[in-house]
Every structure is written in structure tokens, then in C-alpha cells.
Image (cartoon, grey):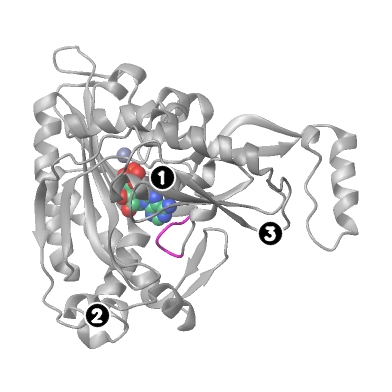
């Protein structure tokens, strides 16, 4: 075997066990986190074999061994849990789904893609994002009497650790680095950049991480604020959160961003209260989907956990039915239809109540649940289903976003 190649190389692999399309999709998505030598792993349609694509300069033996270890844990995932559908709205617009929405928005000058999972937007895209945020906020106030809030974009590592994030999604964390408080190190960094053409990073040993991270799930910053409180009656909170997830090479337009916005709703109380809130959230999703006039479903789902814990955590989530997802039909880059996860409705049991020490009426740790709507994905799904012609949009939305 040639150990050092200049180009991308494809190696055929046999999977340790046959997988269905669902597990194959997870393998492909998570494969960007296997090794810097590996570009990605593509599972063939037979579900039994895969193609390992290595990056230039890869040691093929080392890359293959690592890929096989990754596959050995990923194929343990149990899939095929019955998918229960709780909401199924159908749009009135009879026009075709629009292909290439991301490019179309950029061409119209309504979006700028910085290329690293961040976007700027204006015009109809901004107005639609604001409308979805505003409308869901209003619905939450009316149905749940939710209290408004604002939370920081950064979160300390201890809070994330308490939230269990390092255990579930260690690959998605972003640590904030600073130049060490050292006169000479700072001056070296300043001087290096004063005459360079592009930005030069400080030396590795001159960057320190003080345990600040970019917040990767909208609801986390809320829990430390609840410590010591007793929720005799249930309470709901809502806000627009700024969320960051390191998605590596999986970034893709509005579909998969590094930095995005989530309209969050958190419910805190006893088990009955939290379960009743989850039930009450379903007609609200229905109302929002009808307002924008889109095909939309809410169904049982699981999270894309990091490889080594994926099988166990997914199984637990599916068996307990603690995660429902808002899935909106959209189109992939190749024009094929896919279900875009545009929000989730989650039950956490007393996990956060225990960890952050807040209780319900009987003095036991309170239960929590949350609903997170991915604003940019709702925007992408709506433009996919109505296209760029204002006449196809429902009147109330059209008047707001194209005026
Ligand atoms: P989760 O807490 O993982 O259920 O995420 C809440 C919602 O955020 C998801 O349902 C998506 O709509 C949205 N979301 C998650 N990851 C991304 C991403 N990388 N880019 C854009 N939206 C995302
Ligand atoms: Zn949440």
C-alpha cells in the first residue's frame, strides 16, 4: 500500500454489520470527526460496504484502522424504532419546491455567506427570520404565559460540564482562546501581525483557555439562573438564543451553520406540568406552520451523539420517547427531498433540576423540558416551499417580508 499520497484516496471498506439508511446517514455525518487524515466516509447503498476518502498526505494504514474503530462503534446503533407522527400539516401553495435556495438568496443580495458556517442576512430573509421569532414568541406568551429573557452567547465550561455536554457532544464544543496576559507574548503577536498580509495566530503556548465556551444549546444558560428556586406552580421562559456548534466540514448554507439562532421555550415544574407543556406545544407548531403555509411534521427522534456514546444514548432517547423533532420537507443540494430538522421538543426529566438544584412543590428536584426552533432552518424551509415569487406566499407573510 502506498503510505503517503498527494491526492484524496478512496479505500473500500466492509462494515462490521449491515446498516440501514438512517445509521448510514449518521456514519457519513459524524465521519468528519474521525481523523484529520480522513475527509469522509460514504456508506454504499448496499449498507454493507463503505468508501473511506482520505486527505492528501494521509497514512492510509493509520487512517483505515481509525475508520474501522469508528465504524465498529457506529454500527452498534439500534435503529428502526417506530416513528410516531404527532403533527402533519399540509401547505395550500401548489407550486413546486424551489431548488438552490441558499444560492438564490445570495444572488438576490439577501444573504451573505462568509463560508465558515456564518451568514449575514437582510431584506426578506431578515424579515422572515424576525417574523418567525416574533410569532413564536407571541404564541408562547399566549399559551404558556412565558417570561421573556436574555442570556449570554458565551457559557463557562463548568456549566456545560454540568449540562452533560462534554459527554454527549464533545466534538461540537468551541473554546474561547485568549492571548496569555504576558507583555512579551502580546507584543510578539502584535508585531507579527503589524507587517503580515493575513492574520497570524499567536503561538499555541501563548493562547490560554480560561474555560469559556460558545454556547452550543439555547437552553443551557437558563439553568444556573434557577438555582435555589422552588417552583410551586410551573413556569415557562422564552428567548432568542445565539447558538454555536462546530460542524467541521458538514457546514452548508442555512441548513448547517456554525452560528445560528434558536427561539427557545423552557418549562419548569413537576412531571405533570412539564408533560402538559409538551402536549400544548404541538398545536403551536401546527399554528406556526399554517401561518407560513408549509408542509410540516412533528415526530419522535434522537440526537446525533458523538460516536462512542451514540448507540447507548440514542437507544435510551428512542425508548423513552423524550425527543420529538419538527421536520419540514426541503431539498438537498442535489434536489432530492429530505426532512429538515427545524426544531425539537425535549423532556429532560429531573436532570437539570438535580444538577442545578431547583425544586418543585414537593421539594423534589423539578422537571424541565424545552422547545427550540432553529430560525434559519425555518427560513430555508419556507423559501424552499414557496420559492422567490411573492404571490405564492400567504398574504400575511408576504405583506411583512416583501414590502
Ligand atoms: P437541538 O437542540 O439539537 O434539537 O437543536 C435545536 C434546533 O436547532 C434544531 O432542531 C435545528 O433546527 C437547529 N439547528 C441545530 N443545528 C443546527 C445547525 N448546525 N445549523 C442550523 N440550525 C441548526
Ligand atoms: Zn433546549
Q: Could you classify mark 3 by the number of other residues whose Cα lies within 10 Å: few (under 14), some (14-19), or many (20 or more)?
A: few
State the residue position of label 1. Answer: 27
Picture layout, residue 369 above or below residue 141 = above
Relative placement, left or right, of 65 versus 18 is: right
State the residue position of label 2. Answer: 398
- Region in magenta: 253-257
Precedes in sequence: disc 2 or disc 3: 3
What residue lies at 69% left-to-right and 43% top-to-bottom?
59
Secondary structure found at label 3: loop
Secondary structure found at label 2: helix
Which tag is nearer the camera, tag 2 or tag 1?
A: 1
Quarter-of-image position of residue 313: top left
Q: Is residue 14 visible?
A: yes
What residue lies at 24% left-to-right and 21% top-to-bottom?
350
Residue 114, how many percent across, how many down?
A: 57, 65
Quarter-of-image position of residue 84: top left
Q: Could you classify mark 2 by the number of other residues whose Cα lies within 10 Å: few (under 14), some (14-19), or many (20 or more)?
A: some
State the residue position of label 3. Answer: 7
The span from disc 2 to disc 3 (Cα, nearest Å) is: 49 Å
Amino acid at each position: 500500500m502506498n503510505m503517503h499520497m498527494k491526492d484524496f484516496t478512496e479505500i473500500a471498506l466492509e462494515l462490521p454489520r449491515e446498516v440501514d439508511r438512517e445509521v448510514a446517514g449518521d456514519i457519513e455525518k459524524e465521519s468528519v470527526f474521525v481523523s484529520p487524515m480522513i475527509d469522509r466516509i460514504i456508506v454504499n447503498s448496499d449498507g454493507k460496504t463503505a468508501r473511506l476518502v482520505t486527505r492528501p498526505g494521509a497514512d492510509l494504514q493509520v487512517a483505515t484502522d481509525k475508520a474501522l474503530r469508528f465504524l465498529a462503534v457506529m454500527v452498534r446503533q439500534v435503529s428502526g424504532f417506530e416513528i410516531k407522527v404527532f403533527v402533519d400539516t399540509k401547505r395550500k401553495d401548489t407550486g413546486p419546491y424551489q431548488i438552490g435556495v441558499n444560492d438564490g438568496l445570495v444572488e438576490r443580495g439577501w444573504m451573505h455567506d462568509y463560508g465558515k458556517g456564518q451568514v449575514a442576512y437582510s431584506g426578506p430573509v431578515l424579515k422572515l427570520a424576525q417574523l418567525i421569532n416574533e410569532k413564536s414568541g407571541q404564541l408562547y406568551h399566549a399559551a404558556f404565559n412565558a417570561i421573556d429573557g436574555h442570556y449570554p452567547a458565551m457559557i463557562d465550561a463548568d456549566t456545560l460540564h454540568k449540562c452533560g455536554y462534554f459527554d454527549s457532544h464533545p466534538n461540537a464544543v468551541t473554546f474561547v482562546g485568549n492571548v496569555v496576559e504576558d507583555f512579551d507574548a502580546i507584543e510578539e503577536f502584535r508585531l507579527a501581525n503589524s507587517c503580515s498580509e493575513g492574520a497570524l495566530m499567536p503561538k499555541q503556548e501563548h493562547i490560554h483557555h480560561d474555560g469559556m465556551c460558545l454556547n452550543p444549546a439555547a437552553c443551557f444558560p437558563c439553568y444556573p439562573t434557577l438555582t435555589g428556586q422552588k417552583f410551586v406552580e410551573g413556569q415557562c421562559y422564552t428567548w432568542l438564543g445565539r447558538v454555536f456548534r462546530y460542524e467541521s466540514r458538514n457546514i452548508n448554507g442555512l441548513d448547517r451553520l456554525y452560528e445560528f439562532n434558536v427561539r427557545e421555550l423552557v418549562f419548569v415544574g413537576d412531571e405533570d406540568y412539564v408533560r402538559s407543556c409538551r402536549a400544548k406545544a404541538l398545536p403551536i407548531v401546527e399554528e406556526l406552520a399554517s401561518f407560513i403555509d408549509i408542509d410540516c411534521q412533528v415526530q419522535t427522534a434522537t440526537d446525533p451523539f458523538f460516536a462512542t456514546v451514540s448507540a447507548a444514548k440514542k437507544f435510551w432517547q428512542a425508548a423513552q420517547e423524550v425527543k420529538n423533532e419538527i421536520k419540514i420537507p426541503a431539498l438537498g443540494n442535489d434536489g432530492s427531498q429530505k426532512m429538515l430538522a427545524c426544531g425539537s421538543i425535549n423532556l429532560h426529566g429531573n436532570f437539570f433540576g438535580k444538577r442545578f438544584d431547583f425544586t418543585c412543590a414537593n421539594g423534589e428536584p423539578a422537571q424541565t423540558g424545552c422547545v427550540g426552533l432553529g430560525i434559519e432552518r425555518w427560513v430555508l424551509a419556507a423559501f424552499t416551499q414557496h420559492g422567490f415569487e411573492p404571490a405564492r406566499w400567504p398574504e400575511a407573510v408576504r405583506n411583512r417580508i416583501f414590502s
